[in-house]
Amino acid sequence: MDIDAAGGAATGGILAGALERPTGHAGDAEGHCTDCGQPVEGKFCPNCGQPTHVHRSLLHLGEEMLHGVLHFDARIWRTLPLLALNPGRLTREWVQGRRTRYVSPLAMFLFTVFLMFFVFSFTGGLEPDATSTLPPAERAELMKDLEAARAELAEATTAAEGTPASEPLRLVRQARQTAVNVIESRLGDAPSAKRADGFVPGTWQAQIHDLVASGELKVNLGDEHLNEKVTKKLLNPDLAIYKIQQTAYKFSFLLIPISIPFVALLFLWRRGFTLYDHGVFVLYSLTAMSILMMVISLLAPLWSGFVTLGMVLLTFGVPAHMFAQLKGAYGLSWFSAGWRTLLLLVFSSLAFSLFVLAIITLGLTG
């Protein structure tokens, strides 16, 4: 998991670097451009823009790799403060063509999203809770069910042992055993010794496996082949989660085309704005939210109070950031930005739900 996340972060950085013109250091002129052959006098070719000094050292190769992965230059320090404090101005200036001073929204989004998954892999932000605690009343009810299920299992076992050749009795015993496993998994509060099938009682993996194995959780996608693939993955929940996580960061770009139409709906009757403008808005907004999630994930383990602070930031900071970006990027009044912010919060929930549905579908059927 960690290796895959690191590979994702590196890939995101390389992709981000590839989307923009390199800004590395140039050395002394060589007389002619090694790329196009144009005579040169300065540090860059006036014809194709390539640095006239070609580095061929291992040290420079490492420097290029770090630049590709981290992609930190002077523009990042002009982009990040505006993204946090004045996202509307950042969006507006990029759309209006003042771009050389800032990191492009697409490059920043790609790297930030991949870095977010990389951070989550180390902080445990992608791991579901291993166990669940039941209310006392529900636990008491399940204990009664467990006693009854164990009694039925004992009867089925005795009957099956008396007639070992009977296939129906063997199937009945297997069904009774599955029922006992399901109830034991729901009752478990802490991992204990592994069961015969390799799952630990009380874990979410055991619960999902038992629900699928017992038939309580059925898959019906309208295609028998797809049903079989998804069921097979759900019988091994760790594999299913791994596939979904891999799909999430590989297809994170789907958030862009899913979100743009929702933003466009906010400006149907206003002229002068294009889908490109809305795309820039979406990219910078998603980048800001990704950075916020990373900060919360990194600081929460260090200070318990930051969990509460993080919830406050998510509850009030996200709407405030949306409001500021809408007002500044589109030149809206306070009232116009306010009601659009409320709608955008609803649209964001819908867009994220569609994204999650798409990721789960792709992850389990792929």
Image (cartoon, grey):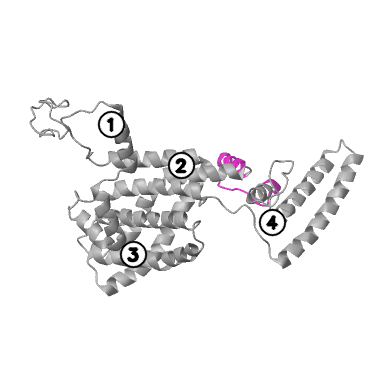
Identity of the amino acid at label 3? His
Disc with the residue nearer the chain's start (2 vs 3): 2
Do residues under tags 2 and 3 come within 8 Å of each other at their CB atoms? no
Identity of the amino acid at label 2? Ala
Residue 227 seen from this side:
no
- What residue is shown with label 1? 60
- Label 3, secondary structure: give it: helix
Q: Residue shown at 13%/34% (left/top)?
A: 43
Residue 154 shown left or right of residue 82 in the figure? right
- What residue is shown with label 2? 5
Measured as percent of width and height from the top left, residue 166 is found at 86, 38
Measured as percent of width and height from the top left, residue 64 is found at 29, 35
- What residue is shown with label 3? 321
Image quarter of residue 294:
bottom left
Q: Nearer the viewer, residue 27 or 202?
A: 27
State how far apart marks 1 and 3 are (Cα): 40 Å
Magenta extent: 213-234
Disc with the residue nearer the chain's start (1 vs 2): 2
- What residue is shown with label 4? 189
